């Protein structure tokens, strides 16, 4: 869903370039609404690949989407695709796996004793390869694969003179924790994108350079305060952003999946009180609502994009 901005220059590099539509909240974590506030160079090269694409690896985001996977199965698969899972083997060691096509696939690895660990889905292929190198005929290989199918879990089995196999069972898989908190630069970027939409080109003023500098290279000044409440146990399939304008600062609250809350205080920015726009993205309906006040939200006086 797109909202046309009134920007004539890129909101990040402030250059007169062709502007492309970019998600206000990163698409990788379910963002729906787009606006043309940045050039493609800032979108892709400066921010996208380095910063925004990593947002989905945040552990709090993964916890939230895991909780909401029945409501948001598509987004769950999108966020979890390629993420790392771990499980305990019955010898108490930990093994790693990756989510691929909706299935957990343990990583192939070589152990210290020279043995190879292979995922169940890949064992036939790997055994054919190894037995082929041993010089077995096609028929002999198929017989050995049948033999392998019949062996019990945790029992060592000598398949040939030089190949011993063992089937292992893993205990339940769980998500491997990555960064616990959201990257502050991603939070600042979401707040900035929202402010671009709400207050428009006022944001381009040079007094706001500190905000752009933080987003681009992480240089933080006292003019910017970011606080995070990573978990409130009130998961819901929506993202919400709203602001509280003051005389000398504006406070932006970002609520992701109803639970992950960030507060961004931007100083030196005075905006009129009526700039209290509430942006709600319903992730189930895939709809965007923009409203002027909480009262209006309650009365469903909303602009549906
Ligand atoms: Zn730019």
Image: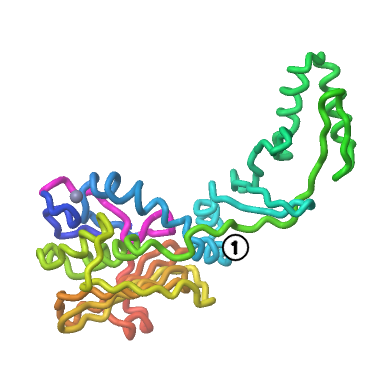
* Element at label 1: loop
Query: Horizontal and vertical percent for residue 244?
Result: 26, 81
Whether residue 233 is visible, yes or no, is: yes
Start and end of the magenta stretch?
A: 16-32
Applied colour scheme: rainbow
Q: Which residue is mark 1?
A: 70
Above or below, comparing residue 244 to residue 111 in the picture: below
Q: Nearer the viewer, residue 237 or 165?
A: 165
Q: Which residue ends up furthest to the front in the rendered image?
A: 112
Residue 5 is situated, as x and y percent measured from the top left of the image, at 19, 59
Taking depth in this image into account, of 292 and 162 the one nearest to the observer is 162
Q: Residue at x 88, y 34 (%)?
A: 157
**On the rendered structure, is 147 left or right of 222?**
right
Which residue sits at x=66%, y=44%? 106
* Dot 1 alpha-carbon crowd within 10 angstroms: few under 14, some 14 to 19, many 20 or more: few
Look at 31% across and 71% down and name the residue there: 290
Residue 257 vs residue 91, the one in the foreground:
91
Tell whether position 25 is magenta. yes
Vertical relation: 111 (above or below) 36: above
């Amino acid at each position: 869903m797109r909202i046309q901005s009134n920007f004539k220059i890129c909101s990040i590099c402030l250059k007169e370039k062709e502007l492309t539509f970019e998600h206000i909240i990163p698409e990788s974590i379910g963002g729906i609404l787009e606006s043309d506030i940045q050039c493609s160079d800032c979108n892709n090269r400066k921010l996208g690949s380095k910063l925004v694409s990593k947002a989905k690896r945040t552990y709090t985001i993964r916890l939230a989407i895991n909780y909401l996977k029945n409501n948001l199965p598509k987004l769950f698969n999108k966020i979890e695709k390629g993420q790392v899972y771990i499980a305990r083997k019955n010898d108490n060691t930990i093994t790693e796996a990756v989510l691929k096509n909706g299935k957990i696939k343990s990583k192939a690895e070589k152990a210290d004793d020279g043995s190879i660990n292979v995922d169940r889905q890949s064992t036939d292929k790997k055994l054919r390869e190894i037995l082929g190198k041993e010089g077995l005929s096609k028929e002999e290989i198929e017989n050995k694969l049948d033999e392998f199918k019949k062996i019990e879990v945790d029992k060592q089995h000598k398949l040939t003179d030089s190949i011993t196999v063992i089937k292992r069972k893993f205990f339940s898989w769980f998500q491997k924790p990555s960064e616990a908190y959201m990257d502050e630069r991603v939070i600042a970027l979401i707040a900035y994108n929202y402010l671009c939409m709400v207050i428009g080109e006022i944001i381009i003023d040079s007094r706001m350079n500190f905000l752009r500098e933080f987003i681009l290279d992480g240089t933080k000044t006292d003019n910017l305060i970011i606080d995070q409440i990573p978990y409130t146990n009130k998961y819901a399939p929506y993202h919400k952003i709203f602001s509280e304008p003051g005389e000398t600062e504006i406070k932006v609250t970002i609520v992701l999946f109803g639970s992950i809350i960030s507060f961004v205080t931007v100083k030196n920015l005075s905006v009129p009180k009526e700039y209290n726009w509430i942006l709600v993205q319903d992730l189930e309906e895939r709809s965007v609502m923009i409203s002027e006040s909480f009262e209006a939200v309650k009365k469903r006086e909303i602009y549906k994009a």
